[in-house]
Image (cartoon, helix red, strand yellow):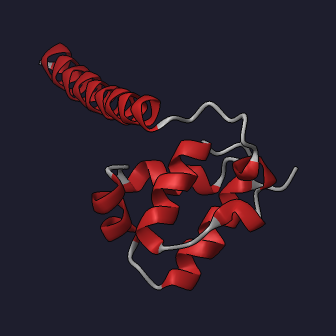
């Protein structure tokens, strides 16, 4: 299997579109996109969403995208997008609370 993150990174670089702009349009945080570059099993959902933004068909490089039995319906994709965003927001909140706790603990 090819390294999906590397394929994604090369396609984004070739598009010339800034990662922050891609993140905004695909509703995937910039940090998540950069983490995806290192992930050999990067989510097909991310790849599809980013492919739409940069107008790139990844099916040539990632054969799994051509599989008609893939279970990535549009409805499931929307729920996954919301779930990932919720996880990112929750993680940010936890980090903020931890920092506040550590500051209070030092006093």
- Residue 42 falls in image quadrant: top right
- Residue 32, x across and y down, in percent: 45, 48
**Which residue lies most toward the right here?**
1
Q: Is residue 33 left or right of residue 88?
A: right
Query: At 19% across and 17% down in the image, what residue appears?
Result: 101
- Residue 81, x across and y down, in percent: 37, 36
Front one among 93 and 29: 29
Q: Is residue 63 left or right of residue 93?
A: right
Quadrant holding the C terminus: top left
* Count of picture labels: 0
Q: Is residue 28 left or right of residue 46?
A: left
Q: Is residue 15 above or below residue 48?
A: below
- Residue 72, x across and y down, in percent: 56, 35
- Residue 98 falls in image quadrant: top left
- Residue 19 falls in image quadrant: bottom left
Q: Is residue 71 above or below residue 97?
A: below
Query: At 36% across and 56% down in the image, what residue appears?
Result: 26
Q: Is residue 31 above or below residue 97?
A: below
Q: Is residue 37 left or right of residue 62?
A: left
Q: Is residue 74 above or below residue 22?
A: above
- Residue 100, x across and y down, in percent: 16, 23
Query: At 19% across and 14% down in the image, what residue appears?
Result: 105
């Amino acid at each position: 299997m090819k390294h999906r993150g590397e394929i994604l990174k090369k396609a984004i670089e070739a598009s010339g579109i800034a990662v922050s702009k891609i993140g905004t349009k695909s509703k995937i945080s910039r940090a998540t996109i950069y983490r995806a570059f290192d992930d050999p099993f990067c989510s097909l959902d991310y790849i599809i969403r980013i492919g739409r933004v940069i107008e790139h068909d990844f099916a040539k490089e990632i054969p799994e995208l051509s599989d008609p039995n893939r279970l990535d319906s549009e409805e499931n994709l929307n729920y996954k997008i919301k779930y990932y965003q919720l996880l990112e927001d929750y993680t940010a909140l936890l980090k903020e609370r931890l920092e506040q706790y550590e500051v209070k603990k030092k006093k």
